Amino acid sequence: MTTRKGSLWLAVAAALLVPAKAKARGRADATAHRDDPVQKQSRRRGERTPQTLRPVASPCGRHVAEVIGGAVYVDGRRVRTSEGSVFVLAPPIWRRDGRAVAWIERSRGEARVVVIDGVDDRGVAPLPLALPDVASDDRVFWAGPQRIHIGRALLNPRAVATWNE
Protein backbone atom coordinates (compact mmCIF):
# COMPACT_ATOMS: atom_id res chain seq x y z
CA MET A 1 0.00 0.00 0.00
CA THR A 2 2.89 2.37 0.71
CA THR A 3 4.23 1.89 -2.77
CA ARG A 4 0.87 2.78 -4.21
CA LYS A 5 0.63 5.96 -2.12
CA GLY A 6 4.20 6.90 -3.02
CA SER A 7 3.59 6.52 -6.74
CA LEU A 8 0.36 8.53 -6.47
CA TRP A 9 2.18 11.42 -4.80
CA LEU A 10 4.93 11.19 -7.39
CA ALA A 11 2.36 11.47 -10.20
CA VAL A 12 0.70 14.50 -8.55
CA ALA A 13 4.07 16.23 -8.05
CA ALA A 14 5.05 15.60 -11.67
CA ALA A 15 1.72 17.00 -12.89
CA LEU A 16 2.30 20.18 -10.88
CA LEU A 17 5.87 20.68 -12.08
CA VAL A 18 5.38 19.92 -15.79
CA PRO A 19 2.86 22.34 -17.40
CA ALA A 20 0.32 20.95 -19.83
CA LYS A 21 0.85 23.90 -22.23
CA ALA A 22 3.94 25.98 -22.79
CA LYS A 23 3.61 29.50 -21.44
CA ALA A 24 5.62 32.53 -22.48
CA ARG A 25 7.55 33.88 -19.57
CA GLY A 26 8.40 37.54 -19.37
CA ARG A 27 9.62 39.79 -16.63
CA ALA A 28 7.28 40.04 -13.71
CA ASP A 29 5.31 43.26 -13.79
CA ALA A 30 4.14 44.38 -10.37
CA THR A 31 1.31 46.45 -11.85
CA ALA A 32 -0.16 43.75 -14.08
CA HIS A 33 -2.43 41.16 -12.54
CA ARG A 34 -3.65 37.96 -14.03
CA ASP A 35 -7.30 38.96 -13.58
CA ASP A 36 -6.94 42.31 -15.41
CA PRO A 37 -8.71 42.46 -18.80
CA VAL A 38 -6.47 42.43 -21.84
CA GLN A 39 -6.24 45.79 -23.59
CA LYS A 40 -6.02 45.66 -27.35
CA GLN A 41 -4.09 48.32 -29.20
CA SER A 42 -5.92 50.08 -31.95
CA ARG A 43 -4.39 50.00 -35.43
CA ARG A 44 -5.62 53.47 -36.29
CA ARG A 45 -3.80 56.45 -34.96
CA GLY A 46 -5.72 59.06 -33.08
CA GLU A 47 -6.50 62.33 -34.76
CA ARG A 48 -3.41 64.45 -35.17
CA THR A 49 -3.37 67.98 -33.92
CA PRO A 50 -2.75 70.65 -36.56
CA GLN A 51 0.92 70.82 -37.34
CA THR A 52 3.10 73.92 -36.95
CA LEU A 53 6.71 74.08 -38.21
CA ARG A 54 9.36 76.76 -38.01
CA PRO A 55 9.52 79.24 -40.92
CA VAL A 56 12.03 78.37 -43.65
CA ALA A 57 13.61 81.37 -45.39
CA SER A 58 14.71 81.22 -49.02
CA PRO A 59 18.45 81.44 -49.81
CA CYS A 60 17.99 84.98 -51.13
CA GLY A 61 16.18 85.96 -47.93
CA ARG A 62 13.18 87.54 -49.70
CA HIS A 63 10.69 84.69 -49.22
CA VAL A 64 9.46 82.56 -46.32
CA ALA A 65 7.60 79.22 -46.27
CA GLU A 66 5.93 78.05 -43.08
CA VAL A 67 3.39 75.55 -41.81
CA ILE A 68 0.83 76.93 -39.36
CA GLY A 69 -2.11 74.91 -38.10
CA GLY A 70 -1.82 72.28 -40.82
CA ALA A 71 -1.78 74.84 -43.65
CA VAL A 72 1.23 75.83 -45.77
CA TYR A 73 1.95 79.54 -46.27
CA VAL A 74 4.41 81.09 -48.71
CA ASP A 75 5.12 84.77 -48.09
CA GLY A 76 2.06 84.96 -45.84
CA ARG A 77 -0.36 83.61 -48.49
CA ARG A 78 -1.97 80.23 -47.93
CA VAL A 79 -1.10 77.68 -50.58
CA ARG A 80 -4.22 75.66 -51.32
CA THR A 81 -3.21 72.20 -52.43
CA SER A 82 -6.20 70.51 -50.80
CA GLU A 83 -9.15 71.38 -48.65
CA GLY A 84 -8.57 71.23 -44.91
CA SER A 85 -5.29 70.66 -43.14
CA VAL A 86 -2.32 68.62 -44.29
CA PHE A 87 0.49 66.84 -42.47
CA VAL A 88 3.89 67.86 -43.82
CA LEU A 89 6.20 64.83 -43.99
CA ALA A 90 9.25 66.71 -45.33
CA PRO A 91 9.57 70.43 -44.58
CA PRO A 92 9.69 73.00 -47.38
CA ILE A 93 13.01 73.26 -49.21
CA TRP A 94 13.92 76.17 -51.47
CA ARG A 95 15.69 76.02 -54.81
CA ARG A 96 19.09 77.78 -54.79
CA ASP A 97 17.79 80.87 -56.58
CA GLY A 98 14.90 81.24 -54.09
CA ARG A 99 12.20 81.26 -56.79
CA ALA A 100 10.79 77.77 -56.15
CA VAL A 101 9.89 75.71 -53.09
CA ALA A 102 8.87 72.05 -52.62
CA TRP A 103 7.71 69.82 -49.77
CA ILE A 104 6.09 66.42 -49.13
CA GLU A 105 2.65 66.33 -47.52
CA ARG A 106 -0.05 63.80 -46.64
CA SER A 107 -3.75 64.60 -46.85
CA ARG A 108 -6.64 62.13 -46.71
CA GLY A 109 -4.23 59.19 -46.80
CA GLU A 110 -2.53 60.33 -50.00
CA ALA A 111 1.11 61.39 -50.06
CA ARG A 112 2.28 63.93 -52.61
CA VAL A 113 5.09 66.31 -53.33
CA VAL A 114 4.03 69.90 -53.92
CA VAL A 115 6.13 72.30 -56.00
CA ILE A 116 5.64 76.03 -56.39
CA ASP A 117 7.81 77.27 -59.24
CA GLY A 118 8.00 81.03 -59.76
CA VAL A 119 7.28 82.34 -56.26
CA ASP A 120 7.81 85.94 -57.46
CA ASP A 121 4.96 85.60 -59.95
CA ARG A 122 1.55 86.37 -58.44
CA GLY A 123 -0.58 83.93 -60.46
CA VAL A 124 1.46 80.75 -59.93
CA ALA A 125 -0.52 77.72 -58.77
CA PRO A 126 1.00 74.83 -56.79
CA LEU A 127 1.90 71.70 -58.73
CA PRO A 128 0.90 68.62 -56.64
CA LEU A 129 2.39 65.30 -57.76
CA ALA A 130 1.12 62.04 -56.22
CA LEU A 131 3.69 59.72 -54.65
CA PRO A 132 3.09 55.97 -54.50
CA ASP A 133 5.36 55.26 -51.54
CA VAL A 134 6.96 57.56 -48.97
CA ALA A 135 9.20 56.66 -46.04
CA SER A 136 9.35 58.73 -42.88
CA ASP A 137 12.92 59.85 -43.58
CA ASP A 138 12.39 60.88 -47.23
CA ARG A 139 13.28 64.44 -48.18
CA VAL A 140 13.08 66.65 -51.25
CA PHE A 141 16.31 67.52 -53.08
CA TRP A 142 16.62 70.01 -55.93
CA ALA A 143 18.58 68.38 -58.78
CA GLY A 144 18.07 71.18 -61.33
CA PRO A 145 15.86 74.16 -62.11
CA GLN A 146 12.84 71.95 -62.86
CA ARG A 147 13.86 68.60 -61.40
CA ILE A 148 13.52 67.22 -57.88
CA HIS A 149 14.55 63.95 -56.27
CA ILE A 150 12.59 62.42 -53.40
CA GLY A 151 14.40 59.98 -51.11
CA ARG A 152 16.94 59.64 -48.34
CA ALA A 153 19.79 61.11 -50.38
CA LEU A 154 20.18 63.13 -53.56
CA LEU A 155 22.04 60.36 -55.37
CA ASN A 156 19.73 57.59 -54.16
CA PRO A 157 16.23 58.81 -55.08
CA ARG A 158 13.05 56.87 -54.49
CA ALA A 159 11.21 59.10 -57.00
CA VAL A 160 12.17 61.78 -59.54
CA ALA A 161 9.92 64.55 -60.85
CA THR A 162 10.51 66.94 -63.74
CA TRP A 163 8.21 69.54 -65.29
CA ASN A 164 8.10 72.27 -67.92
CA GLU A 165 7.05 75.86 -67.46
Image (cartoon, rainbow, N blue to C red):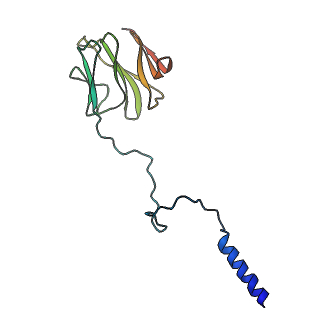
Is 27 or 127 nearer to us in this picture?
Answer: 27
| Residue 128 in the image, given as x and y percentages of width and height | 37, 22
Q: Is residue 127 visible?
A: no
Quarter of the image holding residue 119?
top left
- Left or right: where does residue 61 sit relative to residue 43? left
Please tell me whether residue 152 is drawn above or below residue 147 in the rendered image.
below
- Most extreme residue toward the left is 76
| Residue lying at 66% horizontally and 68% vertically, measured from the top left | 20
Please tell me whether residue 5 is drawn above or below residue 156 in the rendered image.
below
| Residue 124 in the image, given as x and y percentages of width and height | 28, 14
Tally of numbered tags: 0
| Residue lying at 50% horizontally and 17% vertically, measured from the top left | 155
| Residue 40 in the image, given as x and y percentages of width and height | 46, 55
Is 24 or 82 nearer to us in this picture?
Answer: 24
Quarter of the image holding residue 83?
top left
| Residue lying at 40% horizontally and 35% vertically, measured from the top left | 109
- Left or right: where does residue 15 sit relative to residue 115? right
Please tell me whether residue 19 is drawn above or below residue 114 in the rendered image.
below
Quarter of the image holding residue 7?
bottom right
Is 102 or 124 nearer to us in this picture?
Answer: 102
Q: Quadrant of the C terminus?
A: top left
| Residue 99 in the image, given as x and y percentages of width and height | 30, 11
